[in-house]
Amino acid sequence: MTRRRDRITEALWAYAFIAPIALGLGVFYLWPVLQTAYFSFTEWGAFGGHEWSGADNYVRLIHDSEVGRALVNTISYTVLGLVSIPLAVVFAALLNRKMRGAGVYRTLFFLPVVTMPVAVAMVWRWLYNGDYGLINYLLSLAGIDGPNWIADPATALYALVVIGIWSSLGYNLIIFLAGMQAIPAEYYEAAALDGAGPVRQFFRITLPLLSPTAFFVSVISVIGSLQLFDLVFVIAGSGASARANPAYPRLQTVVALFYDRAFVTNERGYAAAIVMVLLLIIAALTLVQFRLQRRWVHYA
Amino acid sequence: MPSRSRVLLHTVLIAASLVMVAPFVWQLVTSLKSLSEATAVPPTLLPSGRWGNYGRVFDLLPFGAQFGNTVIVALARTAGQVLLCSMAAYAFARLRFPGRKVLFGLFLSVLMVPPQLFIIPQYQIMSALGWLNTLQALIVPGLFSAFGVFLLRQFFLGLPPELEEAARLDGAGPVRIYWSIMLPLARPGLLALAVLVLLWSWNDLFWPLVVNSDPDTMPLSAGLASLQGQFQTDYPVLMAGSLLASVPVIVVFIFLQRQFIQGIAQTGIKG
């Protein structure tokens, strides 16, 4: 009898511990997801009301060339940004040893990760400046006449990718370092006894055993890149001023378009449909990665 | 390692570090230049020391107020999340109750959804409460986090159960066990969560942009972004402002590096 009462008391305490956050997550996160899904089937009037419009938003979306461009930009940015992963593996391998200054290097690589993205975007915008930017000055020393990076449709997206890699490299590196440190030292000792040098050890031991980490990092990077917003907002602006930039069609991402539709032109039903598509793309790409992992990920 | 390859190793690492650090150095150098120095061709390397650019930031923006807003919001969100998430995490890790799996699954599902899906309804709630352009709007939705529950639950699961059992035999109830045993033991985990929340809160742009358009209630991120639109060409002042806004978190990072890195290495999530 007392046992039963104890169990009931324990459950009641558990609900009391969970209640505050369950309420908050329900009101601010779970219910909003359902509402956004519903909004994607509605049209919003100028004064905030909305009415059911069936699949209209989705039909409009398919024919909207701006959505198409934003999708192409976002996916290109995401795919090109994956270069950060092999780079991070190489630098993690270089740092994964006892040596002088390892901590300092690690800190320097990590600085961009903790820096406010708005500040990062401003600094790079200045570095990329066509007339007075440091990058074009350095290029001019080599006799190259650099373009107007972020205002030139031919280079704008690549310029964005470079910022993305610079700011995520340290983060990926830390995760790879943790993965490398989890590999038992005996494997390397055995390989060394068999006469395998450091390069062979890297390809035969480190890389295969690191593949689960690499898989994890690639899933996280893809999800993060697909939501790119801050950099674009600061580099290209939004609304009318952004459209003045000839490179804007190459910079606008899905989330930037969502911001524009939801809070600049106030087409919230349409904006909801745009993020529903984003949700589908993220889910699909994550699923594809989980499917593909069987071909290259080795679990020890 | 032979000394030649050690020299090569450090050469590669120093070159890469220079690329990582150069933008910060150039930001600092530019922030101390006059506009005509900044636009000189070829660029001057040593600035003339125009510290007045930092004062100009305060003229263009209510920088002090925005700094205060950023600090208050970051501290409130961090304290709230550490408390609320640790309570729920303790219950999920150690207490038995009907519906535990279903509830935890629901919490996890929040983690899978890209945050843009929450924004429109959250904005409507803020608007209905009359909270637009207030600090509550920046704080309240950010008090709740499925990620924090997940992170701390993992942490509690890894703690040895012996101390708790001893306390329970002494007649301690769940509240005492949570407060005087679990929380002190979980210090490293709580600190890891705290530094991550602090970082996200400090740097977040999208949500403040949506709810607070009044410069006096904006955090630094949104204030700085608004400067970009109006004063596109005054780069020395923009560099001074962006440096002032980002340096506090960088300093916190340098002091709490181990917690930052542990938090990220353990969870792999940046936000």
Image: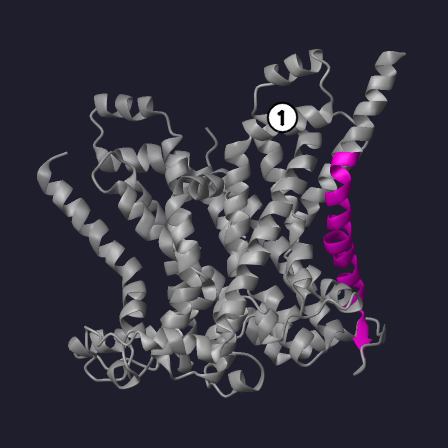
Range drawn in magenta: A16-44
Residue nearest the viewer, comparing B61 with A220: B61
Above-or-below relation of A281 to B36: above
Question: Looking at the image, which residue is at 28% across and 82% down?
Answer: B34
Question: Looking at the image, which residue is at 53% across and 68% down?
Answer: B66
Percent x, y of residue A172: 41, 48
The mark total stands at 1
* Label 1: element kind: helix
Q: Quadrant of residue B16?
A: bottom left
Q: What amino acid is found at the position of numbered circle 1 in the picture? A: Ser
Residue nearest the viewer, comparing B54 with A73: B54
Above-or-below relation of A131 to B190: below
Percent x, y of residue B222: 54, 70
In this rendering, would B147 be left or right of A134?
right
Q: Which quarter of the figure is the N terminus of chain A placed in?
A: top right
- Report crowding for label 1: few under 14, some 14 to 19, many 20 or more residues within 10 A (C-alpha): few
Percent x, y of residue A177: 37, 39
In this rendering, would A248 be left or right of A258?
left
Percent x, y of residue B127: 76, 69
Question: Looking at the image, which residue is at 81% across and 64% down?
Answer: A38
The disc numbered 1 marks a residue on which chain? Answer: B
Report if residue B111 is visible in the image.
yes
Residue nearest the viewer, comparing A123 with A37: A123
Q: Which quarter of the figure is the C terminus of chain A placed in?
A: top left
Report if residue A233 is visible in the image.
no
Q: Is residue A25 magenta?
A: yes
Q: Is residue A268 magenta?
A: no
Question: Magenta stretch mostly in which secondary structure?
Answer: helix
Residue nearest the viewer, comparing A12 with A31: A12
Q: Which residue is mark 1?
A: B180
